Image (tube, rainbow, N blue to C red):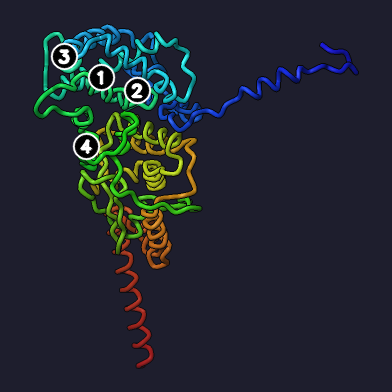
Amino acid sequence: MANNGDVVKINIEEMLEMLEGAKAPLITECCIYKVPFSIRRHNEKAYTPEVVSIGPFHHGHPRLQDMEKHKLFYSKAFLKRTQTTLDTLIGNIQEMEPEFRRSYSHTLEFSMEQLVKIIFMDCAFILELFCRYHYREWKEDDMCLPKPWLTSNIVYDLLLLENQVPFFVLERLFNLSFSSRGGHFPSFLELTFDFFEEFNRSRLNFNNINRIRHFTDLIRTFHLQDPLPSRIDGKVLKHLPSVTELSEAGLRFKVIESESCLLKLDFSGRVLEIPQLEVEDGTETLFRNMVALEQCHYPFQTYITDYVDFLDFLVNTNRDVDILVQQRVFLNRLGDTDSVATMINGLMKNITISNNISSQYLDVSEKLNAFHKNPWRKLKSALRRDYCRGPWQTAASIAAIILLILSFVQTVCSILQVIRQ
């Protein structure tokens, strides 16, 4: 430590060399991210695989080791299915390894040899899994597909943002393995669509997909519409009445077909047309990972985030959920309406809202705010809230009004009688 008054000599040349070697990070190829801590801490389970690790971020986790043995089994089965050799596959993986590394947001602390092994095992597992699922090859020695609970866990593990391998790696290895197949042989994209069919809300056709970065990216695409609505710069959703407030003001909900994309909203007259949402055990995981992807990769195309933000305004209490369930907007598989309200209200914690909202959501939101601000509707809402909350209160209010009218008529008649005398 230098004494007071001593001048510490800084190695300027060393600092210049350090600055000279600095390079801008390659962000154009990055598409797989670790979820930011500020978001992840609200529900770590929603971003962490339950049974199988895919890619480097969760590789080696002690809780996921049981599945590693089955990855080996599937990899061996895939080599028997493929028309190429292990040497050829490994050689191609080595060529792709630098591009593979650049797909991840964090530095990967694995050697090239270690990373090549991870890529081969994980990709071979997925390719064999998708082939077996597509051809419905249920075998006695298979511990995955014959067990619905395990298959369900694997499906949700494969859509987690942190649990991905780039789609181009899977597709290249698949094409290399089956390049000489004759007749109609499905593409890997076709197999992928088949495996994740339950998430394809918009019923997209695999022939209309231009580019997929990974499975989380595909799941997000499944929930969008084509063409995407325009976005308006400098606008954010600042306020929206709750479902209860809108309902008391006379709003009615009309459910759009369940196959419609989430972005399809319309409001006219007193009717809000809104897609139906099935709320089940995996819903929170699904939306949290799509929103996390938008936060990291699509900061100016936050269509799913817009939808979640819209729901967050509409739903404040279990009463709001009850109304949406009664109107069939929500299919509640959780049973407890409090759990649904808590889940929806938690999705937007520490989520940054971009200042360019979807034109569709902005238009509907402005109309709903104007609808609720109408003074006549506010009066009707207050009357319903204060005097017509339940059948008994409604009956009592009606009786009171009738008595008031009769009293008024009696008073008028008495006054007229006095005047005539």
Secondary structure of the residue carrying numbered label 2: loop
The alpha-carbon separation of the residues under discs 2 and 4 comes to 20 Å
Q: Earlier in the sequence, mark 4 or mark 1?
A: 1
State the residue at coordinates (24%, 53%).
254
Q: Is the residue under label 3 in contact with that under label 1 (CB below 8 Å)? A: no
Q: Earlier in the sequence, mark 2 or mark 4?
A: 2
Q: Residue furthest right?
A: 5
Q: Nearer the viewer, residue 398 or 299?
A: 299
The residue under label 2 is 165
The alpha-carbon separation of the residues under discs 1 and 3 comes to 13 Å
Are there few (<14), some (14-19), or many (20+) residues within 10 Å of tag 4? some
Q: Earlier in the sequence, mark 3 or mark 4?
A: 3
State the residue at coordinates (46%, 52%).
239
Position above or below: 46 against 110: below
Q: Earlier in the sequence, mark 1 or mark 3?
A: 3
State the residue at coordinates (40%, 9%).
114
Residue type, numbered disc 3: Arg
The alpha-carbon separation of the residues under discs 2 and 3 comes to 21 Å
The residue under label 4 is 206
Could you say which disc has been placed on residue 308 in the image?
none
Answer whether residue 316 is visible to the viewer in this image.
Answer: no
Q: Is the residue under label 2 in contact with that under label 1 (CB below 8 Å)? A: yes
Secondary structure of the residue carrying numbered label 1: helix
Residue type, numbered disc 1: Ile
The alpha-carbon separation of the residues under discs 3 and 4 comes to 24 Å
The residue under label 3 is 81
State the residue at coordinates (21%, 8%).
76
Q: Earlier in the sequence, mark 1 or mark 2?
A: 1
Q: Earlier in the sequence, mark 2 or mark 3?
A: 3
The residue under label 1 is 126
